[in-house]
Amino acid sequence: MAKMNMLQAINSALMLSMEEHEKSCVFGEDVGYFGGVFRATSGLQEKFGKSRVFNTPLVEQGIIGFANGLAAQGVKAIAEIQFADYIFPAFDQIVNETAKFRYRSGNEFNVGNLVIRTPYGGGIAGGLYHSQSPEAYFAHTPGVKIVFPRNAYQAKGLLMSSIEANDPVIFFEPKRLYRASVGEVPEDKYLIPLDKAEVVQQGEDITLLAWGAQVEIMEKAAEMAKKDNISCEVIDLRTIVPWDVETVANSVLKTGRLVVSQEAPLTGGFASEIAATIQQECFLHLESPIERVCGLDTPYPLAHEKEYMADHLKVYEAIKRSVNY
Amino acid sequence: MAKMNMLQAINSALMLSMEEHEKSCVFGEDVGYFGGVFRATSGLQEKFGKSRVFNTPLVEQGIIGFANGLAAQGVKAIAEIQFADYIFPAFDQIVNETAKFRYRSGNEFNVGNLVIRTPYGGGIAGGLYHSQSPEAYFAHTPGVKIVFPRNAYQAKGLLMSSIEANDPVIFFEPKRLYRASVGEVPEDKYLIPLDKAEVVQQGEDITLLAWGAQVEIMEKAAEMAKKDNISCEVIDLRTIVPWDVETVANSVLKTGRLVVSQEAPLTGGFASEIAATIQQECFLHLESPIERVCGLDTPYPLAHEKEYMADHLKVYEAIKRSVNY
Amino acid sequence: MSKTQSVDNPNNINTSDTFTLDFVSENALSIPSFKMLNADGEMYPEAQKSSLDKTTALKIYETMRFIRILDERMLAAQRQGRISFYMQCLGEEASITASTAALDDQDMIFAQYREQAALAYRGFPLDLFMSQNFSNKDDLGKGRQMPIHYGSNKHNYMTISSPLGTQIPQAAGYAYGQKLEASIQNKETNCTICYFGEGAASEGDFHAGLNMAAVHNAPVIFFARNNGYAISTPASEQFKGDGIACRAVGYGMKAIRVDGVDTLAVYEAVKLAREHAVKHNEPVLIESIAYRLAAHSSSDDPSGYRSKDEEENFRANCPVARFRAYLVKQGWLDESEDEAAKEQIRKQVLDALKAAEHVEKPELSELVTDVYDDIPNHLQQQYEALKQHILKYPDAYPVTSSRIEEQQ
Amino acid sequence: MSKTQSVDNPNNINTSDTFTLDFVSENALSIPSFKMLNADGEMYPEAQKSSLDKTTALKIYETMRFIRILDERMLAAQRQGRISFYMQCLGEEASITASTAALDDQDMIFAQYREQAALAYRGFPLDLFMSQNFSNKDDLGKGRQMPIHYGSNKHNYMTISSPLGTQIPQAAGYAYGQKLEASIQNKETNCTICYFGEGAASEGDFHAGLNMAAVHNAPVIFFARNNGYAISTPASEQFKGDGIACRAVGYGMKAIRVDGVDTLAVYEAVKLAREHAVKHNEPVLIESIAYRLAAHSSSDDPSGYRSKDEEENFRANCPVARFRAYLVKQGWLDESEDEAAKEQIRKQVLDALKAAEHVEKPELSELVTDVYDDIPNHLQQQYEALKQHILKYPDAYPVTSSRIEEQQ
Ligand SMILES: Cc1ncc(C[n+]2csc(CCOP(=O)(O)OP(=O)(O)O)c2C)c(N)n1
Ligand SMILES: Cc1ncc(C[n+]2csc(CCOP(=O)(O)OP(=O)(O)O)c2C)c(N)n1
Ligand SMILES: [Mg+2]
Ligand SMILES: [Mg+2]
């Protein structure tokens, strides 16, 4: 065990995976000599050489196109998109290619070797283009798995599992927590399953569900609610696709209430999918409407970021609305 | 009035709008001399000349990038993406640019002059790449409006409104109905509002909601249910963003039941957004869980297209499940 | 003067100066087409010596002959409503077949969709062509894609994907993987060939793929098929430069333009390109010039956008006839044997077609496999629900209902 | 030989032939940099005559002088935590300012982010620079974007957007609109200039934008700023060709490479390009060669990827100093007046900064305006709910809560 922040945990996962798989590459904008703008890949080029760890030209559609081909050839292709806001030029390569590669070929070819790492999320004064949480766009795309770590420990285990997985994975890293999340992390390899939510905190009265950086917000709100004698069950979804309906439904069957929170705008977000599914799974057990606490339906702002965000106070209010319904 | 199919209605809308606005252009792959692979733009180049109606090189990100600039300059930019399956290379230009153009500039600049027309949907033996219904990707993107006509009459009125609107619009055309939907269509200009759902058929027992080609499926299912003495209220949403919560909620408050159907895969589709919102708006009035009848969570298949589709039989079964809950 | 990269030249440019303000002309490059065989199948007097041996030459010819018959027959089948869609290679048979012949069989092929000749050259069986077009249960692609979307791992032929241009950066990545593998195994590398149309070359993915291949030294041959049209859009509305070849220099890449109707010239050009690619781990761009003689696809009618005169003009310029004349003159092909063989092939194709159309569709379960490596819970549930639904309405889903019942 | 398009040439290529198989070399083009002023601010003996008049020359110099001071001061403000982010123009002032000076004020500017000098040249007021950087209520962009994302309709300066390359096809479309407008109004057209870095030139949008501008004859000047780096990525890992200029021929477009440290040369090059663009409705590509002397942004530390030696080497090559020396030699600038002016500007900048940082933030309601032309119901509801929430927790949202209360 060692104290690591999330960047170090990610770096450690990459180091171990690259050691294990001789046919593996890490690449993206500035990931080479410099080690990435957040330094998640620092030391990798030094250790594994320029042919396995390299800067790409500045072209996201090329990075993922190249990665698809590389993965199809049999190389563990670990591509970085510098900010999730800049993943959209690669949207066609991900949605029409990555996600459909195995299906369309009848499994003659696949890109199960692909992992796309990308920092996402707000709360860092990043404005429109350094704050987005685009997971819902990909969650509507059968064929890719979508994974979110909430802290350093989770980050390493989930990333190593993503690299091992035989399916393409988009790995969303909460950049607000890159340095803020510090914890005990094993130095060796370990895996965390890609289809299990985790009950982070047991509770009786209401279920709070989130993923990534938003889990911490839920915990903060649960803390506040505790003072009102409201006992919250907090769940970290961890994997958005496929998601663990069973764990969530079981919790809601118990509590009768659900608040889901995401950073992204409300309309069409993944919280809506959860609400739609859970109202079906738990219809007769729901004591109040499922609450969604999300970003507003606007582009991500700067001056009013604080007001825009789905913070713990808004979650707390939703908890009270739900309990007092 | 004249009998027109949907392609003729669209062509008529384009003719009238281009006549009205001297500063307007229609462009896209093969839309020029040839009049588009579906012939929706036929006759336009002849009438308005090559400088206003033209083929573009084969590059969707360029078509929409160019369109954004053209619209910002003050030209009504009417761009065609040949199939909605091929809109993804333009995803960045739409999601990061079109949708955020006015907001990020504080209204110094805007692309309210932009309309993107694109044929979508399945049922034509198109397989993975000539069948997709990607509306949910855009519905999660504040800043663009999303419009779906269900027949020839709606197509003309909604398209003319989309061209008049001061907001960018993605206009999804149900290609399965291009020639199949024939009806009386006024030869002159008329507008249909972009934020109102339409109650296509009144009913008492259950609300059926859809958009585009799927409305016809709902009507067919309603017909079947009628024989079981189930009275269905059928609503055509028409505009996905912003959507008419009030009309839908009022209907569900009356019927207590809702089936939503979309062509796209279930997970993360717009039907989920509707379910999430309506369970909140109508919680105490819902007699059964909101049902979603959608495509399976797979890429769009070919040999098993019939089995894959959200057809009237599946909707009918959902109606019965809902009513017998 | 060529550039040298160094700390003194961070901009990575040619470092010479000028004091005269003038444009670099839009016509600064002028790229001729490489030719060997004239329209009558005779070597041009100035032509260089051919390295194509008799066995390979005949294999190329037989492939072209086969593809022409297959295309004719399948288009007719589409017209008869037996298959839903088809695309012909007509006019580009030499370009595709000779280029594949110049490769090693272990080299990877990323095609666009009009390159069935490459797959045929590699020995893809006739019944698998048919199974794909009929989406039956023997289709390697499990009946999921429209006709002509072939793919075969065994034949190193990447499954076709309809979105245009996407295969270009993929080919760069694939070739990079081949290079990496070769260096790990300390053997000579295989390379990748990537076919695409002059229309697809307008996509952003073209720019991405060529630049990345150049920067990362991937052994890939980019094979641009300039056939004059992208559906109805003529090349003159697609680009203003001198075709596709002239773009190579922008990526610091070598290029060749070749007459795509000339089997010998294509063969030599690709052979040279391959040698260079695998020896130096460098990409090469080849532009092959031909004319899309057929309609774009079975859904298209070119009379809406080009003249019969133009078509007739190019119909005379047939790659198969030209190469056939060469073979006959070489004494490598007997005309009457050739005619007999054609009859034979026509019959084989028709028999295979008839057989394939009666093979049943893939199992219903194939609707949910291969989305992921394993079938996740939610898909398994959707599948089970669908099965129950079909059993409730067997007549509405005749293709699958009977077979599900059998299984019960 | 140049190509002529016709039915005989559907492939739209140069139609000459060759019988010698050889690569078109990756170095087939060799593009020199156009220069006029040497490092000491003296005209090269071979240099052509300058057409830059004294008034314009001084306006250019004053802009560069201002931008240097602004950049210094704002970077310091970022270091002090007064603003969150900043990007300097250091090393590229001549390239930006002289290029803008060669335009008409009605020409449109699409910039990347490092071109504040262009906006300053157009007379954008100091307090608006400040308002943007402080996201205060006077920011034309209503406080929504990070610092340095300027935009002004009045100054024909399109609002900056962080995603790289997106402005390139947009500029083509904008210019096409200008051409259309000019033809409708029967007047001479204005043009668009589009700035982008050598890094951004790798994006697919670059390919799309240049090709479409060429094919559709849009009067746009593509101005590539090759400054050696894209954050940490050196140009040698960005492309293998001869910079960006050599790509023009691939699009059938004219090009010029110019020394971006040389004010006179940039001015003449852009003047010529503009004349051509508006007269012939044709795009032109200009590549300007300079060195990004500063860190990429205030978040970056270049010592992690390049040597101090390299930086020192290029620091000596200062575009402002070079042009200043020229002006002094021309007798157009008095050195002591210049020094006094600098003092004056420093004070103005500091005063403006202090004023701007005390201006309040935009109204809360601006959170939901401009998403659409009107505020739709659902957004109005979200806004109302937010307002109530803030009133409940005024201390948690101090910037807005007090002002909402005022409104009540
Ligand atoms: C991304 C994308 N856009 C549009 C299409 C529709 N489409 C299919 S083929 C084609 C023309 C392709 O022309 P070219 O690349 O020259 O190839 P050719 O058909 O001439 O062999 C078009 C526009 C597509 N398949 N993919
Ligand atoms: C689409 C996209 N990808 C990545 C980034 C992150 N990013 C911002 S600036 C930059 C480097 C740009 O380099 P260049 O174009 O050469 O301009 P310069 O900074 O040198 O002026 C990168 C990678 C971005 N803003 N947009
Ligand atoms: Mg073509
Ligand atoms: Mg740069």
Image: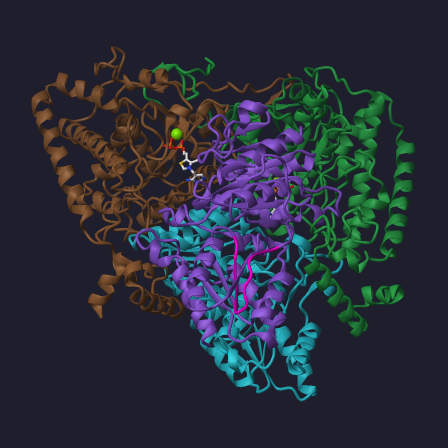
Chain colours: A purple, B cyan, C green, D brown
Prevailing secondary structure class for the magenta stretch in the rendered image = strand
Horizontal side of A221 relative to A307 (left or right) equals: right
In the figure, is residue C401 to the left or right of B144?
A: right
Of residue D235 and residue C69, the one placed in the foreground of this image is: D235
Q: Look at the image and say whether residue B160 sits in the magenta stretch.
A: no
Residue D311: x percent and y percent?
A: 34, 19
Q: Position of residue A74 (x, y in %)?
A: 69, 34
In front of the other: D162 or C158 = D162
Q: Nearer the viewer, residue A63 or A232?
A: A232
- Whether C125 is drawn above or below A210: the answer is above
* Picture layout, residue C386 above or below residue C204: below
Q: Quadrant of ligand 4?
A: top left
Instruction: Identify the residue at horizontal 18%, vertical 29% (top origin).
Output: D65
In the rendered image, residue A128, in percent from the top left (x then y), is placed at 38, 49
- Residue pushed farthest bottom? B229
Question: In the figure, residue D125 lies in which quadrant?
Answer: top left
Q: Is residue D19 visible?
A: yes
- Name, please, the residue furthest toward the top: D45
Total marks placed? 0
Residue D11 in sight: no
The correct choice, above or below, for A271 with respect to B284 in the image is above
Q: In the picture provided, is A86 more to the left or to the right than B108? A: right
- The part of the image, by quadrant, that contains residue B289 is bottom right
**Residue segment shown in magenta:** A197-211
Which residue is painted at 39% across and 53% down in the image? Answer: A300
